Amino acid sequence: MRKAIFLFFLLLGIGIGYLPARNDDWGMRIVMMAVGALFGGAIGGGLSQIGKQASNRRRLLTEEEIEPIPGGLGTSGRDLAANYWRDEGHAPFMKPPRPELGNHMFDADKNL
């Protein structure tokens, strides 16, 4: 039934494209019928839901879901991604210490 709906709108688009160019030469007829087929195919595909994905596909499990790390420790890929901005890209307990005088201790315009 989906294919029938799609083909109906495709042929309807070709026919509608042919009507305004029926008195022109064949080049113009073909171009107008192609434009009609483009729009008819898009409308027919949307109404018949040809491109719709199946919702019953099974989701693949990640490695962490198959074999979870006991305790977590915050070192899994998911934990690192979730806390990336908080940890500024460093792994837990691996963050370098901040400089004593701040990040701008070597600025030329800093007054000591």
Image: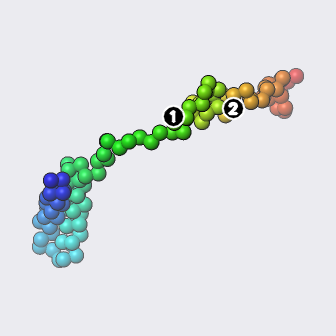
39 lies above or below 21: above
Q: In the image, residue 67 lies at what x, y percent?
A: 55, 35
> Viewer-proximal residue, 73 or 9?
73
Is the C terminus in the top left, top right, bottom left or bottom right quadrant? Answer: top right
Residue at 67 percent of width and 34 percent of height = 89
Residue that sits furthest to the right in the current view? 112
**104 horizontally vs 85: left or right:** right
Cα separation, mark 1 vs mark 2, equals 21 Å
Disc 2 target residue: 91
Q: Which one is earlier in the sequence, the residue at label 1 or at label 2?
A: 1
Residue 43 in the image, given as x and y percentages of width and height: 21, 52
Residue at left 79%, top 26%? 97
| Residue drawn 29% across the image and 51% down it | 51
Residue sitting at 22 percent across and 76 percent down?
A: 27
Q: Which residue is mark 1?
A: 65
Give the amino acid at mark 1. Glu
